[in-house]
Structure formats: structure tokens, C-alpha cells
Image (cartoon, coloured by chain):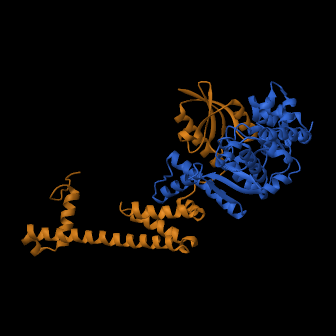
Amino acid sequence: MNIFDIANQNLDSLKIRYKLLKEKYEDQDIFGIFSKFVKLVKDKWTISINMRQGVLNNFLIAGKYKNVYEVKKEQRGELRKVRKLEISEEQAVKMHLKGYYKSRVTFDRTFEDGANFKYGALNIGGLGLKKYGDYCVVIKREQSEDYTSLALIKEDSLNYVEEDHLNIERLSQDIANRDCVHTLVALKHEKDIEGIPTDELASMICCNECYVEAITTDDILNKHIESVRMSKKDYHLYYDYLYKNFLSELSTLELSDIVKRYWLEDFRNMQELLTKQGIELEVIDENGD
Amino acid sequence: MEIKIIAIAPNDGWGFFEKEERIYLLHPPYTSSNLIEVSRKEVENAIHLHGFEECDISLNGINEAVKFLKEKYIESKETQGIDLPSSKQLRELLKYASDDVLLEYLNKAKRELIPEGKLDAAESIALELMKLERVNDNPEMRGKGIDILDKCSQGRERVKELEFGISNKQQETWRDRFPYVVDIYSIDSIMDYSKSIKERGHLLPISRIGA
């Protein structure tokens, strides 16, 4: 089964459902808000991936984003070199995933090329899914459109795994290709848009609690990055630590100060890599000040 | 209250823990806003998609969990052979700071450090910032930097004057209190003698006999 074919096959159904939705709102006051919202999504959508500092730095150094299978394959190679240890790829992934092996692998294994899936989220602005990383890596719009494979799922793909099987029927209705991004989002949020200020629409579409999942098998390279976003609060926190360093208040002996020194060094490395690679660091004020 | 760490990303000091059948994510800088409740599905995604490792470690409360995650983070740096960065290395981060941050540094140096007498720190900030082209090219920031340096040198002058004043005052006291001694000995030798008495704790030198 090919997930991207399923996304393509859902095109007509999404278009019909979207047409009905538009007709429903046409005579209502909310139609203006609805149209603006759809236009905003159409104009601004792209893919983002949230990363922790270490993951982002490794991505910028390696030049290529790796999924868990690729990381484990690499580590397996290293283990083989160091300990002459022979373990299969499946064993390596199983060892890593342990009790959490089942659902995700059920999803990946249902589809051809599942081991090459890279997961991101649909983004029209904001800091994305901060629960998986403070840094929101935003892919260039033209690149997101250019990925040869791209499927967007209305919610987290694990929500479609029931016991030991995938609910294909439900997934087939909730999946879109790049041509139907705005229709999928409109259908998902039709009841949410009224009363939400325009500057909060971005975080409604992509936040810790709610997101449209994006899957591709294409390579995600550092040259695809449009910008990296971080919160103003975090940004200023790093510079507060640096200020303490000027006052000689960051010791080299206290556990919490040692940690701060390493955080600052990681942050400095990231800024150096971003500058060298011509990638903008966008500092976003979550409070809108 | 016992908690159980169920997944960690040691390279970044992030971790999920279970407490009274609820799951929480804890991550740097470990303030209350960095503690969020999550579902088991999110732990699964974190492990599968975001490089977390499953673990099963019982600890006594959140403070212990924070300590554990910090130690794991430092351990991972040591394993990678990354030395603790020096203060000088960290200062390089300044060149990436926004104008807001640089201005804030200069303002703090002027408004907080100089009045507190932390002249070395204020001067160090001004000098370090004035190495940056961006600061030198910005009349406002450059002006603030020069002002800080001026205020620091004025501050130091004042301290010197104050010290000199104290020393003069002390000399006057000697003259007033011991006019005959001052006629015979110099002020410096009287001060040296006074200092050695203070250090010894008694008036005359004592040697230990038969020791």
C-alpha cells in the first residue's frame, strides 16, 4: 500500500466536501472569515519540524535530517566497528523502541517505504509543536511543494492505529496531497475559525495540542530550510545566562552552572551554523508584544 | 513523592516521567512552564520520531528528576569529548546577539553595575561590545559604550581619591595622638610597626625558649 497514492485518491472526495462546506457558509456572515482563512492557508502553508537543540545542530552539521531507522542504522554500523557486534536493523529499532514498538511500526509497516517516512507538521506560522523541540525548523514553501512525495494527515497518524491494525478507511478520508492542503485544513477547522483572532490562526493549526501531520520519503536537507524559529523568551534567557557569565557568576563547579555553560555553547554553535548556511533565526514573541 | 522516568533524550536533557498515573514532559531550563502533561502516544512519538530513549528509573520527586536529567546531559557532553566552554569562548555568542540584547547589556552595565561599584564587569561588557562592528557603527550603542568607559574611569579615580583621603586622615591622626613619636620616626615606619603588632596580636616579639 502506498500512502501517497491514498492521498492522491482522496483528492476528488476532498474537493466535493469542500464545495459543500463553502456552499453551507456562502449565505452566512462568517463566509468572509472563512474565505480569508482558506486564502491564508493556501498562501502560507509549508512543512515544519520541531527539533531540540542537539538534534538541530546535528542536522545542520550532517546536512540531512535522519529518521529513527536511519539513525539506528548508523549507530548499528558504529557498534559493529567498535564491538564487532552483529545486530539486524529490526533488532536495532526494536531495542530502541522497546515497549513503544508496536503502534508506530504498525503504521510504518502498513505502507511501502515506511522506513523512509520523515514526519513533520503543516505550518502557516508560529513555533509549531514545542513539546518535541524548542526550535521550529521551517522548510521553504517552494521546497515543500517540490517534494515528490507528500501526504498530509488531519491529525497524528498514531490516532489511526487501533490495537494492532491501521484503520485505513478513516485514514483514507483524512489524508490529502499538496493540492488539497487548504481543503483538508478548512474541513478540520470549520467550527473553530469563528471568533479566533487572525494572529492566532497559525497556532490553532499547528501547536502542541493540534496539528496536521506531514509525511514525506524525500530527503530533507539543510538547504531546504527557510528559517529556524525560537521563542523570544528562550532567546533572552540564553543572553541572561551570558550576562551572568560577564559578572563571573557562572561557576565551573556547580551542576546548574555547568549545564548553563553547555547550553550556551550549543546555542552559540547553532547560531554559527545558521549564519554560515545563510539561514535566518526568527525570534518569535509568543505573547505578541 | 516517587516518580518514574520513562523516556529521556540525554543529549538535550529532556525527559518524560510518570507521576500518579499521569505523564509529564520536563525539559530545560526546567521551570514550571517547561513541565507539560502529555499522553502515552506522545511518548511513543517522542521515542519513535524524535530520538528519545525508553528507560525505567524511579526517583524521589521532580528535583531529583531535574538533577538526573542535568547529569545525563553533562555525561553525554563528556562522552562526546566536549570540554566545558570557557567564559571567553562563551563571549563569542555576543556577535550573534540582536540589537535589543546589546542595548540591554549596555543599559544594565550603566544603571546597575556602575552604581553597585562593579566597575570591572561594566568595563568588560563595554569593551567586549565595542569590539563588535555593529556596535561601533551604531551611534547610540557606541555612545553608551564610551559613556560606560568614562564612568568607570571616573569611578576608579574617585576610589583612588577616597583611599588617598583616608591615608592623609590617618597621618593626621598619628600626628595628633603621638606628636613626639612622629618627630623621631617616619609615618611609614610607624604604620609598618603598627601593622606587625596587629598581625602578631601582641606588643613585643616573643621567641620560644628550648623548643
Residue A196 falls in which quadrant of the image? top right
Q: Is residue B142 above or below residue A229?
A: below
Q: Judge whether residue A86 can be spotted in this image.
A: no
Q: Position of residue A221 (x, y in %)?
A: 80, 54
* Left or right of B125 on screen, residue A8: right
Q: Colour of chain B?
A: orange
Q: Position of residue B8 (x, y in %)?
A: 66, 38
Q: Position of residue A169 (x, y in %)?
A: 87, 30
Q: Is residue B105 above or below residue B168?
A: above
Tell me the quadrant of the picture where the N terminus of chain A can be found. Answer: top right
Image point 30% across, 68% down: which residue?
B159
Q: Nearer the viewer, residue B17 or B90?
A: B17
- Letter of the chain in blue: A
Residue A117 falls in which quadrant of the image? top right
Q: Residue furthest left?
A: B180
Image point 44% across, 68% down: which residue?
B123
Q: Judge whether residue A100 can be spotted in this image.
A: yes
Q: Is residue B56 above or below residue A140?
A: above
Tell how many labels.
0
Residue A93 falls in which quadrant of the image? top right
Image point 72% across, 63% down: which residue?
A278
* Left or right of B109 on screen, residue A281: right
* Left or right of B210 on screen, residue B58: right
* Left or right of A131 on screen, residue A24: right
Q: Position of residue A103 (x, y in %)?
A: 79, 30
